[in-house]
Image: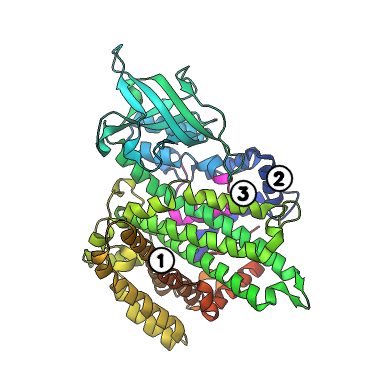
Amino acid sequence: MTDVLDRLTAPAEQLEQRLGPADDPANPYGFAAAARRDDAGAYPDELAAALRSTGFHLDYLPAGMGGTFASFDRSMLLVRAAARRDLNAMPATMFSITAATCVRLHGSAAQQAQVAGLLRAGGAVAFALSEAEHGSDLLANTTRLVPDPAGGGGHLLTGEKWMVGLGQRCDAAYVVARTGERGPGSFTAVLLDLVTAGPGLDRGAPVPAGGMRGIDFAHLRFDRLPVAAEQVVGRPGEALEVAVKAQQVVRLMSTAGSLGCADTALRLTLGFAAGRRTGRAVLLDTPYQRRELAVASAALLAADAVALAAARGIHAAPEQFSVWGCAAKHVVAESVEDAIARCGATLATRAVLRAEGPGGGLFQKLQRDAALVRVVDTSTLANLRSFSGQLPALARAGAVTADEDRARAVFALDAPLPPYDPARLDLNARGRDLPTGTLGAVAAPAAAALAEGGAPAVAALAEQLHAGLLALPAEAERARPGNELVDLAERFAWLQAGACCLQLWWASRHLPLYGQKPGSASWLGACLAYLLARADGRPPRREADLLAPALDTVLDLTAAGRMYAAAPAALA
């Protein structure tokens, strides 16, 4: 590799060595142990303890709060190293990220110290926002915080919060409750110590989920629970805005969990296909399965590039993440679902067997876990709706000259990133979308370089991508609210993903991305072919010739014992 990529992958590689070979049946931090826990519905106590011993659970906290966070691109690879073994590692150690981000955004110094102390000690702070009756319609929530008639500046909290992660075992909870009658300014947050909460709190029975078996969810019920004045977080009426901003970070980090599931699913499937014969041929060498696995490989490589760009983009342009984060979440979740489904088709019957399936039933766990990550922060439709209304204004916004410098900071992996500043997160994206708005300066020279470098088909895809993005403003102007605008939001997400891939190749073509020689465009062609097909609603398998190099790339990474990533960390 290079010093640049080695620095990026170092934390993940150190964790890999600490946890040992994932395919060792005797390894308590390996695939077999994850399958056994899933079968028993057991919490990953031993794995979580091992991760905490390395400081993994503090990787989203800044140094000022006692954390080890450096940058999101490093954190994403670190989380993937744990999630590829067992996705439950994420909720078991990092479910507090939403609450911690909220408190960091508007909590008092004392509240920030309280949260940091709990997390450093291995505790958890739950995030309680959603309600069963209202789902993503947050403005309809009814859990209410009212002044205590007894006086003293306190309040009483009444209502029920739905599917609170780690709700059974958390030490504290950040709860968003209604304090007004109408509009987004009608909600206020409180930080509750649930250990000493008293009879006004009922954690209820554990709520089982199809994925992440063993991770506890709870419906937290409050019945006139006393809340002291110092437990109110920030100013009255600002909680919903802060919570929505914090969820932008959660969407970004959730992509690491999705990629971890897909990495293992594809790795298991390739191992099976390489050792399975059908007639006289090895399954991996049969044309149909090779094409399906090429589609799965392209989907995973594209998802990785999109997640990497977003992880760096939140440093450079956090004010755009009300759109960028949602678009990245959609593309990664949908691409991972596609990749795992194609792996399942290759495994056939073994995809639905438990004891005899790859990894002793691990594949089924991966399917269920990835499905839960897809909707854990919001539904697919709500995610698209959340930014569809911004598309007309976003498409009209003029590019700022300085954006080209910011784009280089995102897509050149050896460029220094500005410090992450969560205070710059916003509810509406400001300015032109960075990946698509600066593509005009890149598309023509990149296409020329691709053509001159012997990749005319990839050059044509780059030109097709640019043309599609140029047509978006007119499409946004014509789109009617409702299905048309939501469909356009989905098309934008796939095209933005293509822009991220092309920009990443252009700015980092001097680096050995995906373990390939610097300047190699084979992975880029596969990713663009896949993403443009999805943007146009075409079956990606029709681009078989362009997708084939993605499988070759993944097979090379498999042989080298590395993660399926642009910065491919070495695996134990």
Q: Which residue is mark 3?
A: 86
Which kind of residue does numbered mark 3 sit on? Asp
Report the Cα–Cα distance between label 2 and label 3: 11 Å
Q: Is residue 106 magenta?
A: no
- Residue at 41% x, 36% y is 133
The nearer-to-camera label among 2 and 3 is 2
Name the side, left or right, on which 225 lies relative to 543. Answer: left
| Labels 2 and 1: the sequence-earlier one | 2
Q: Which residue is mark 2?
A: 36
Secondary structure beneath dot 3 equals loop
Which kind of residue does numbered mark 2 sit on? Arg
Question: What span is colored magenta in the figure?
Answer: 67-90
Q: Position of residue 335 (x, y in %)?
A: 50, 62
Q: Which residue is mark 1?
A: 494
290 and 320: which one is in front?
Answer: 290
- The image quadrant where one finds the C terminus is bottom right
| Labels 2 and 3: the sequence-earlier one | 2
Report the Cα–Cα distance between label 2 and label 1: 37 Å
Residue positioned most to the right: 280
Report the Cα–Cα distance between label 1 and label 3: 28 Å
Badge 3: how crowded within 10 Å, few (<14), some, or many (20+)?
many
The nearer-to-camera label among 1 and 3 is 1
Name the side, left or right, on which 525 lies relative to 209. Answer: left
Secondary structure beneath dot 1 equals helix
- The relative height of residue 189 versus residue 419 in the rendered view (above or below) is above
Q: Position of residue 206 (x, y in %)?
A: 57, 32
